[in-house]
Image (cartoon, rainbow, N blue to C red):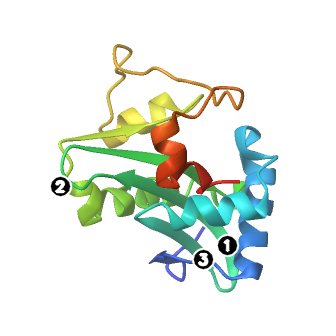
Amino acid sequence: MDCRHIQFQFTQSFDAVALQQLQQLFQRTAFWARDRRIEDLATAIANSKPVVTVWDGDRLVGFSRATSDGVYRATIWDVVIDPDYQGAGLGRKLVQTVLSHPHVNRAERVYLMTTNQQPFYERIGFETNPTTTMVLFNQSELEVPRWVRESGEANIRQ
């Protein structure tokens, strides 16, 4: 596949059409993200830096984002390439583009969450690190500490 016309872009906001395309891309490509709502996607994008999109004309064919403190830790999230475009090196270039951003490339460690694609990421330079990954599933029944309620931080996501 000739991909010379494919455009990679750093993005900080999505219009309604792009958000809908992103939701459809997740539904087509990512079993772990099929039920994401457009409102939640917009929030995730707003709280991520960088956000990298891949376009074939006006068609969104790839996406990834990262969160970082800019010094110590960064995490890459949601790496997706449309199945029609897989195998052409776009996924590698997408991850490399995220890694090139100053919020990520200055971080001491870059983490990445993946379910089935460990060999792909190992070819880019990532290593399996079973000793540091833990997860806390959101438990809405947990009581919010009083100091958080009083600061207004508890009202960020409703």
Please provide percent x and percent y for residue 57.
65, 86
* Badge number at residue 86: none
**SS for callout 1:** strand
Q: Identify which residue is drawn at 64% across, 31% down.
A: 138
The kind of residue tagged 3 is: Trp
Disc 2 target residue: 106
Q: Residues within 10 Å of mark 3 (few under 14, many from 20)?
A: some
Disc 3 target residue: 55
**SS for callout 2:** loop
Q: Residues within 10 Å of mark 1 (few under 14, many from 20)?
A: many
Disc 1 target residue: 60
Screen quadrant of the N terminus = bottom right
Q: Please give left or right for residue 142 compared with residue 38 in the image.
A: left
Of labels 1 and 3, earlier in sequence is: 3
* Alpha carbon distance from label 3 to label 2: 26 Å
> Is residue 154 depicted above or below 93 in this figure?
above
